[in-house]
Image (tube, rainbow, N blue to C red):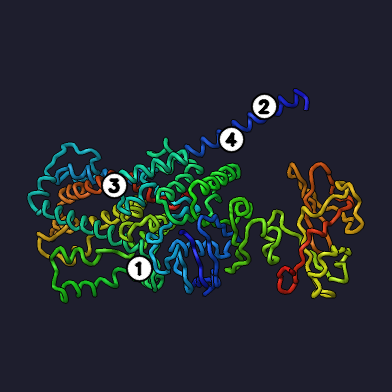
Amino acid sequence: MSEVRFVQVSKEFEDNNKGKFMAVKNADFTIRDKEFMVFVGPSGCGKTTSLRMIAGLERQTSGDIYIGDRIVNKAHPKDRDIAMVFQDYALYPHMTIRENMSFGLKNLKRPKSEIDEKVTEAARILSLETLLDRKPRELSGGQRQRVAVGRAIVRNPKVFLFDEPLSNLDAKLRVQMRIELSELHKRLGATIVYVTHDQVEAMTLGTRIVVMNQGEIQQIDTPEELYKNPKNMFVAGFIGSPPMNFVKGRLEGNTIQTAEHVFFVPEHMLSTYKAYQGKEVTLGIRPEDILNLEQLTVQPAHNIIEPVIKVVEHLGSEFLVYFSIGEETIVAKFNADYPVKAFTKQQLYVNMDKMTLFDPETQFRIS
Amino acid sequence: MTTNQQQIQLQLDEKKDKQRNLWKKTGLALIYVVLIIWAVLTFIPLIWMFVSSLKDSTAITQVPPQLIPKQPTLDAYQRVFEVGGFARWFLNSLIVSTILTISNVVLASLAGYAFAKLKFPGRHTIFWILLGSMMIPGQITLIPLYILIVNTFQIADTYFALVIPTIVTTANIFLARQFMASLPSSLIDAARIDACSEPKIFWKVILPMAKPGLAVLGIFTFVANWNSFFWPFLVTSSNEMRTLQVGLTSFRYQYTADYGAMMAGAVLTAIPMFIVFLVLQKYFLKGITIGAVKG
């Protein structure tokens, strides 16, 4: 069983400039066996610190960390049965690719025949056979990344740790490596913990995702759940590209009254929001849930707005359209078949069936 | 644009390009002239030293001086070996400089690594204290150091006296720390995960990467100790314990000086330094650009 469990884990750092600060606060979660768990969040949110605590490169200030059934609080990295892939690859520059990949096994005093076999196998999986006798500097970024993954594979560890492994690659290579990593996960059947700040990577790779902010875990869920049912405004704003739009308003009867518009709340949702009648709320609406009226075959009765379009961004298959509601800038994502021009008035339909309401004070989703 | 206009534009561009090239070439020529003058100025004393070592004792003080000796002779070299204990001084200098080079490279790299990459309480404080000690001029510590070596430890006129005060210098620790800090920490993390023990990380991962920096450190230390005069002069009294630089002064007598022998000795003294520099030149050039470019 290669499960990773955090029990009330905190990490405090002392920084010369900032003084003492909590990088991770009371983290409590379980990464299941064979799961691809992605940690995502803005820089400084504590995701890499969490990963380094699993690796044993940082010692937690309080709490317990389990790998499998074993508590590893004081275990040295080498005794944790983990392998890590670093953001800058961290290949030993003076060693050949073969030496890089076999270094760990040599240190563990494994027999030479076993080392050779594992290195050859990993090189085959990652198409590195012809590069084994080269030095890292003779390789391209993508190839170096593969070597770093290969070095982890030969160890056959319980848990693979990835620290933003794709962030140094160009966009095209990143997509390719993403697919390869996903295939590798299926093939190895290993537990993978993966840190990234890129939510697209998180959504495409993760079986489940941990969203972190300022050292605190915001939500742990499948990509679909995170997208559909974000627990709070941070998650809603972080997951999805472009992020969810937020508009301040007041719940009055079956309507939400904002500075400029009145939106009708679907009947079946009203009971959920009973407690907020007459109170301030924040309306959250995804860019793809604002539609160009021309797209619709049936004319809706409510929730039509007619703002002046400020900016239109062309993305090829779709448009990003920016306009204002009150002081908020709102973005909508349209199909490219229905072009829109900037500085014109445009009739838009807001699909309130897909809306989310948040408590503006606690920032939690009202449910 | 019409074809005519385009042609005129092309001609103008060509003219500009030519002008630009001319400026580039003039600039380059100027740089070469300055560098050549500099090189000549640097070489004159060395050449003068060599030429003088081949003159006899009358020609050496002759005015106007002979640029090329009329009767070149190796007499001065003979005197160097006959009169003093040149071979012994040479051996002493070699022993002292080699020991100090090794001790400085080993100890400074270990200390530099610890200060740059290991986390231990008080590391910043200790490092700042060390840095602070660099601001104390050597002249101030000279007398206490002399009393310590000569009176307290009573090891004057021994190799210990020559070696111990500079067995590792703060400047070298500082230099080592600076280039160790430029090595990526993720490699150390990777090695830890690769089941590498801490001494092995230093030996197998850090040292191979630090080679250029350590070569610079080694050259500096060797040259500085090879040329060191004042401290060996203070703590050695017997002829057998003298180093080269101290030994050379024995060609200066109360009323006269054997300049030929001094020059010949200086030529012989300079040879090992040339060898050290030529052998480690590759690392030296790499070392002085450490941190200048991202790998």
Left or right for A154, reference B242: right
Q: Dot 2, how many residues are within 10 Å of its Cα: few (below 14), some (14-19), or many (20+)?
A: few
Q: Residue furthest top?
A: B3
Left or right for B213, reference B152: right
The subunit carrying tag 3 is: B
Q: Is residue A96 among what the camera can see?
A: no
The residues tagged by marks 4 and 1 sit, at their Cα atoms, a distance apart of 49 Å
- Residue at which label 4 appears: B20
Image quadrant assignment for residue A302: bottom right
Identify whether A45 is placed above or below A362.
Answer: above
Residue B11: numbered disc: 2
**Which residue is rendered at x = 32% and y = 55% of the image?**
B217
Q: Position of residue A79 (x, y in %)?
A: 37, 61
Q: Position of residue A224 (x, y in %)?
A: 67, 56
Q: Dot 3, how many residues are within 10 Å of its Cα: few (below 14), some (14-19), or many (20+)?
A: some
Identify whether B282 is placed above or below A217.
Answer: above
The residues tagged by marks 4 and 2 sit, at their Cα atoms, a distance apart of 14 Å
Which label's residue is closer to the chain start, 4 or 3? 4
Q: Position of residue A61 (x, y in %)?
A: 47, 73
**Which residue is rendered at x = 77% and y = 52% of the image?**
A288
Which label's residue is closer to the chain start, 4 or 2? 2
- Residue at which label 1 appears: B134
Q: Residue furthest left?
A: B82
- The answer to whether tags 4 and 2 share a subunit is yes
